Amino acid sequence: MAPFASDDSATAAEVDDLRAARRRKAARYVVPVAVVGVAAATIGLVPALADSGDPDLPKISAQELIERIAASDVEQLSGTVKITTDLGLPDLGGLESSLASGAMESGDGGSSADPSSKLTELATGTHTLRVAADGPDKQKLSLLESASEYSVIHNGKDVWGYDSKSNEVYHSTTSGSAEDGKDQAAPATPQEMAEEALKAVDDTTSVTVDGTAQVAGRDAYRLVIKPKDSGSTVGQITVAVDSKTGLPLKFTLTPSSGGAAVVDAGFTQVSFAKPAASTFDFTPPKGAKVTEGEDIKGEDIQGGEGHEGAERHARPEEDFGKGLDGLKVIGEGWNSVAVFDTGGEGMPSGSEAGGQFGGFLDSLGDKVTGKFGSGTVFSTRLVNALMTDDGKVYVGAVDKAALVKAADAGK
Amino acid sequence: MSRVEVDAPQGRGELRDQPPQRESRRTTFYGTLFRNELHTTFRRWRTLALLGVLAAVPILVGIAVKIETGDGSSAGGAGGGGPAFISQITNNGLFLVFTALAATLPFFLPMAIGVIAGDAIAGEANAGTLRYLLVAPAGRTRLLLTKYATVMTFCLVATLVVGVSALTVGALLFPLGDLTTISGTTISFTDGLLRALLIALVVAASLIGVAALGLFVSTLTTSGIAAMATTVGLLITVQILDQIPQLDALHPYFFSHYWLSFADLMREPIYWDDLTKNLGLQALYAVVFGSAAWARFTTKDIGS
C-alpha cells in the first residue's frame, strides 16, 4: 500500500494505525452500497406505502351502480389512459406491421394520419393515450408514441387526424349531429367499453358490486360482470366506476384460463376540470400533407372504426366470414358461436399444403376430430375458431370443447 | 486523509523542486480550483475538437434536409423515418434544434462526455500531474467534486453548442415562426424558444449519469485511454442491451432508457411521467457512482 516504505522503523502502533486505515477505506465503500440499498428499498416500498388500501364507500347494489353509470353526465374531462392488450395472437412482430402498411398503401394511397390505420395499432401491446373532452362538440384523443404523437381532434364540424411523426394531416367534416359527436368521444375510454359490456347483461350473466378500489387517485366501486355458464373464455370483466361522477375509470377483461388480463384499460390520471380551449384548436402546420377524407357519419369516426379495427384484428376469421352468406349464430349469451360456410374445401392441412408452409399452418392450430368430422382449432386467449375440413368455420369467445360441441350439434 | 498522503512528499525529493506556479492550480479558494480546472479542460485541443464535431452534426443534418427537400419532397421519407422531428424542419428551423439533439443524444454527446469524464482523474494520473494536485491542502473529496463539476459544465456546454449551432443553421436555411407541437396545438415562436432551452437543459441533465459513471471508471485506472474506452464501451453496451426485448424488466434502470423523453416537452400539455423518471434515474446514477468514485479516490494510493 505505501509506495514510500522508507519508514522501516514502523512500530506496533503504526501497524495498528495501518489496519485502522484499511478498515476506514473499506468503510467508505459502504456509502455507494447503502445508496443502492436505499434506492432499491424506496422503489420497492413506496408504491406499497402509497397504496392506502381500498377506500371506504357506502354499500351500493349493482342496479344502482349501473344507473349511476347511465346517469353520468360528465362532459368535461381530461386525463391519461393506459391500455394493455394481450390477445395471445401469434407474435409476428415487424412482419405484421409491414404487411399491414403494405396493404394500406396499395389500398387507398393511405395517409398515415388516417384514423382507421392508426387505431388498429391499439390491438396489441401497451399504449398511453390522452383524452380530453369539453361538451359534445370538442373532443381530442392522442396516442402517445416515442417522440411523436397521433391525435384525433374533433372540434365542431371538423375532424382532424394529425400524425406528428410524418407530419401528415387527415381532415374530414362530420355531418352527424351533436349527439353522434358524443358517441365519438373516445372509443378507448372506459365509458364506452363498460357500455359495451353492459349491453351483454341478460340472464346468462351475473353482475355484482365487488368492493371498492382506487383508480387514478379517485374512489371507485368495482362492478364485476361474469358469465354464468362455463365454456366461455371470458373469465370476468371488472369495471371500476367513479363513486362521485359515475364515470367508468377502468376496464379489465380477464380470461377464464387465468393469467394476465386480455384487455386492461384505465385512467392513470383524470381531471374533471374544463380543458383549455386551445387543446381543441388545430391548424395544419405549414408544409404538412393534408388528406381530405369523405364526409363521414359520426359513428364511423372513431367508435366504429377503432372498435371494429380492434375486433378485426382479434378475429380475422370472423371478419373474413362477414363477407360470406350464411352467417348463423348458435347458442346465446356468452357461449354464442358464429357459424359460416366458406363453401370451400376448408383449410389445407399441413401435409396437403406440404413443405414449410404446411408446417407453419399446423403450428398455428390444433387438430381436432368429432362427430362433425375433423378440423383445426385456432386459439387466441379470448377467441377460438374451428375450421372444419369441409369448409365450415365456428368462431366464438368459448373454449375448444364448446366449439366442438357446437360443431357436433350443427351437424 | 490517510497518513500516507501526508507523508508522501517526504519520500519524493523532486516534489520540493516543483515550480511555484503549480501551486496556483490548487489554492484554498474553491472557485479558483474550479476555474483552473475549467480553464485546463476547455483549453485542450481534444475538448475543442469534440465540441467542433458536435457543432458539425446540426450543420450536416440541416444541409442534408435542405438538399433532400429541394425538390419539394418531405424529409425523412413518407413513412416518417429518421430522427425525431425531422419531417418538421422544412417548415420551421427551430425543429432542427430538436432533431439535432435527438440525433446526438444517443451517441455523440455521451461519447464526448465519456472522453472528458474518463480523462478527468485517470488522465491526470497518466500524465503524472495528479500527485501535484493532491499535495494541496484542498483534499481529495474537493478535488473530485471539482472534477465532477467540470464534467457537468462540459455536459451543459456541449448540449448548448449543439443547440446554438442547430438554431443558427435552422434560421439560415429554413423559415422560422409559430410552431406546431406534436400534440397538434400551436405555440408562439418565443414559447418555442423557451421550450428549446428547457429541452437543452433536460438533455444536459440526461448526461449526468454517464458523467458520474465515467468519473468512477476514471478513478479505477491510471490510464486515461483505458478509462475513456471503458466508459464509451459501457455506453454502447447499455444502448444495445436496451434494445433487447427479453431484458424488458431491466430497461427502466439503464441510464439511457428515458433519454428520448425530452421530446415529451413538445407535447401539450407536457407529459411529465417519463421526464421525472429520467431525471430521478440520472440523480440515482450520480449519487451511486459519485459516492463509489469518492470511496475509491479517497482511499487509493496515488503513485503518479
Image (cartoon, coloured by chain):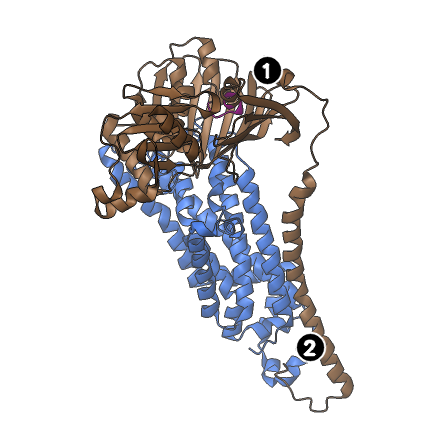
Q: Chain of mark 1?
A: A
Q: Nearer the viewer, mark 1 or mark 2?
A: 1
Q: How far across and how far down the image is residue A73, in percent?
A: 58, 14
Magenta segment:
A187-193
Tell me if A334 is positioned left or right of A284 in this view: right
Q: Which residue ends up furthest to the right in the rendered image?
A: A13
Residue A195 falls inside the magenta stretch: no
Give amino acid for label 2. Val
Q: Nearer the viewer, residue A226 or B62?
A: A226
Q: Which residue is mark 1?
A: A72
Quarter where residue A401 is shown? top left
**Residue A254 against residue A66 in the figure, above or below:** below
Viewer-proximal residue among B289 and B97: B289
According to the colouring, which chain is brown?
A
Q: Which chain is blue?
A: B
Q: Residue at x 50, y 46 (%)?
A: B258
Query: Callout 1: 10 Å neighbours few (<14), some, many (20+)?
Result: some
Residue carrying label 2? B6
Disc 1 marks a residue whose amino acid type is Ser
The x and y percentages for residue B113 are 48, 57
